[in-house]
Amino acid sequence: RWSLFVTPYACAQRPHRPPPTATNLQVDRKQLLRQIVHVWALSLLNNNAVNADPHPGNLLFRLTPDGQAQPVLLDWGWVVRLQRHELLAYRSLVMALADMDMVAATKSLKDLGYENTQDDRAPERSVQFFSHLFRDTGSVATAKKESKEFFEQRKKQKEKDAELGVREKGGRKMKKIPDSFMFVMRVIGLLRGLCATLEVELPLIEILASHARLANADDEAAFRSGMPKSPAATS
């Protein structure tokens, strides 16, 4: 069965390629990217219908009559919906990471269905991994520096494990992974890449956590009022 999704024509341009660009038009790139990240956070954590392909080629912007940059998001042919338990686990995870709550983050990962061979003895390492993925955005140079530091930390952990004789045979390997994991990580990675391309710093985890809290509050309010819940709450 085929379906057709049609969007109206938008006279817009790419923010990262000349001519013209968000830079030479003196557009507030940080505000533009902030809007985009908020849209994806809302789509993922509240509406439960997220565009899984937010690469730079699928982003345009247009100027409103008052000169403000308005994002134009293209290609909604690849939309991901989460299972109810996955949605709640992702909400809990981003809130726990924002609060730096190791215990809650560890529980959220288990609820999500994420597990590796080191989680029983060193669950904090999985939390560190997700904290790294959801860290603040920045320039390409900053991203490379942070990734290098993270993997150096991992190397030291590996060496310490070997020294103590506790390293698992074959090292750290996945035991369980949720079906949605690669889609969600792809979205986060592409959003980070978009921000890096335009050299925009944003508090990614804080934005995600704010939408998770609002989504939980909306669900609670709907439950108390007896009104139909959001699509996310009934998926």
Image: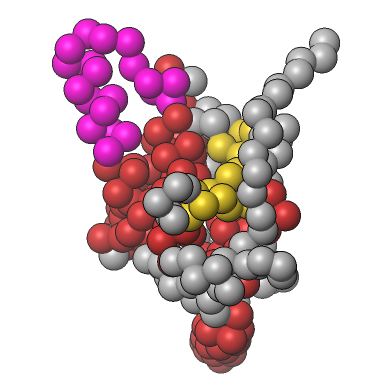
Percent across and percent down for residue 195 are: 54, 67
Q: Residue at x 71, y 67 (%)?
A: 19
* Colour approach in the figure: secondary structure
**Residue 217 colored magenta?**
yes
> How many numbered discs sit on the rendered protein?
0
Q: Is residue 119 visible?
A: yes
Q: Quadrant of the N terminus?
A: top right
Q: Residue at x 27, y 38 (%)?
A: 214
Is 53 situated above or below 164?
Answer: above
Q: Is residue 129 visible?
A: no
Is 149 situated left or right of 135 in this image? Answer: right
The dominant secondary structure in magenta is helix
Percent across and percent down for residue 84 are: 46, 27
Q: Residue at x 23, y 16 (%)?
A: 223
* The quadrant where residue 52 appears: top right
Percent across and percent down for residue 234 are: 43, 17
**Residue 86 colored magenta?**
no
| Residue at the farthest front position | 65
* The quadrant where residue 10 appears: top right
Residue closer to the observer: 3 or 168: 3
Percent across and percent down for residue 189 are: 61, 60
User: Magenta stretch?
Assistant: 214-233
Is 209 situated left or right of 168 in this image? Answer: left
Is 76 situated left or right of 25 in this image? Answer: right
Is 45 situated above or below 96?
Answer: above
Residue closer to the observer: 42 or 110: 42
| Residue at the farthest right position | 1
Is 67 situated left or right of 191 in this image? Answer: left
